[in-house]
Image (cartoon, coloured by chain):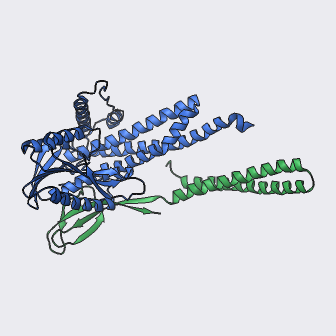
Amino acid sequence: MGMEGGPARGTSIVAVLFSLVLILFMVSLVLLYQAISAYWTGRSEQGFSFLVFSLLGLALSTYVVTLTRNRMMMAAHGRTRSVFTLIECLQCGFKSIRAFVKGDYVLRQAETCPKCSKQMTITSVYLEEKKG
Amino acid sequence: MATMLYGQRMQAWTMLRHIDTSLRRLKAMKDEARRATLETLKGLTKEGTDLDTGLDRLLEYFWIPPVSLDPAGIVGKLEHLLDVRDDRLKAEVGSLAPSADAAQLSNTENLVEAALALNTIYRVVRHYYLFGKKTMSIFLIYQLEAQLPLIVQEAEAMMGAVQAFQLGQPIGDGAGSLVAARLMYASEKRPVAKDTVASDVAFDGRRLVVLKAEGPGANVGKPGDGLVKVLNENGGKASAIIMIDAAQKFEGENTGEVSEGIGAAIGGIGVDKFKIEETAKKYGVPLYAVIIKESNQDVLAPMKKDIYKGVDEAVRRVKRIISERSVVGDLVVVLGIGNTIGIGQ
């Protein structure tokens, strides 16, 4: 129950954050325009203040966007880990792979070989990681 | 102006925020390990056992290393204390899980050890975080933040072990054991020391005595005691001792790469290493080492395919060393080192 609405809440937080960053970005651009106008009209002190605030706003919005993007990419590149059991017939070389089942261990006798009817052996229990 | 006056404080706040995020991750891992341990114990306990209290008591378990002011004889003291700790922990886990067989008991004991390690990591990091927050000492906070990536990496490796111990899957540390298991497969086994088995194998006219921890439960055995017994039984007349173990790779090296050298290839606190070196020196037997390289995370995670390739290569190298360093009729002792969970023999 505690997890209900979790992803939706996460998405809305990101949406609000991006909206705020967008507003900050727009305001910074306006300030930059004001700074340039002020310099052109000879109000250099006022122009300098506008320039500082606009650059701060641009830097902050870029930083927040980069940080959020990196975190989202890291979350998207999570790995799925699966463990498999390789069963081999040491007589005829027949191999079969299946998902690990509790109780499997390396060098344990497994089911009989479908090819030569000899007892097969578990030769490896291994981890496979997939990105994405 | 504000940055000049409060720069250091702002830096401390930023770092504390980073530490807080990592601490939450450590807490989640610790809680998950406890939950997994509890779930395993529930399947092996009898009705009416207070598992929560029992497990929480175990998760705070500690051991006090012996005094080293006068180091003579410290290995014996270390071994004694570690044996007592091991026996006590096994007995405690046994009382919580009375219906567990030997392998399940070893696996559950290792699971408890992993949960205990995660609990300790969390408590230590939380201690320094809260202390740093309280004192706002930038140097304390710096040190903790600098070490956090390594600490979190170690905790993540331990989480991999939790899954392996819960399900009885072989872990990367078992690479050395697997080499020995491959060499002794289908031969008769005999116990030579606590949780340790040996097997006589004929190879290329030589007599091999292959030792490993007894699987498939989570055991590391006592390879030191096993070697002492085997060499004493044979009057020390061995032409080589070959040890195979998993070892940490450097960044840039591939998992499963194999290297050869000399010396006792064994980790841990040093009790078994001491015994092996002492015995080899006593009888003048050369010690050869073969290592299979892995990262810190691979050591405790379920074994990867690359490590199996390394095991195949290590078996070939061991056979080559035997052929080169001994003659027909010689005795060679082969020790496969590591946790043998999920590996039979």
Residue B252 figure quarter: bottom left
Q: Which chain is green?
A: A
Residue B138 placement: quadrant: top right
- Considering the image in quadrants, where does the N terminus of chain B appear? top right
Give the color of chain B as drawn: blue
Locate residue B318, reporting x and y percent.
Answer: 20, 57
The C terminus of chain B lies in which quarter of the figure?
Answer: bottom left
Residue A118 lies, in percent from the top left, at: 14, 69
The residue lying at 52 percent from left, 56 percent from top is A75
The residue positioned 18% from the left and 75% from the top of the image is: A115
Q: Is residue B222 visible?
A: no
Residue B163 vs residue B316, the one in the foreground: B316
Q: Is residue A88 above or below residue B73?
A: below
Residue at the farthest top position: B69
| Residue B60 or residue B281, whichever sits in front | B281
Residue farthest along the right direction in this orientation: A41
Say whether residue B15 is visible: yes
Is residue B273 shown left or right of residue A36?
Answer: left
Q: Where is residue B332 shown, x and y percent of the image? A: 13, 52
Q: Nearer the viewer, residue A110 or B155?
A: B155
Q: Residue at x 33, y 32 (%)?
A: B61
Describe residue B151's horizontal placement relative to residue A109 as left or right. right
Q: Could you say where residue A65 lies in the image, as x and y percent from the top left?
A: 65, 56
Question: Number of marks in the image?
Answer: 0
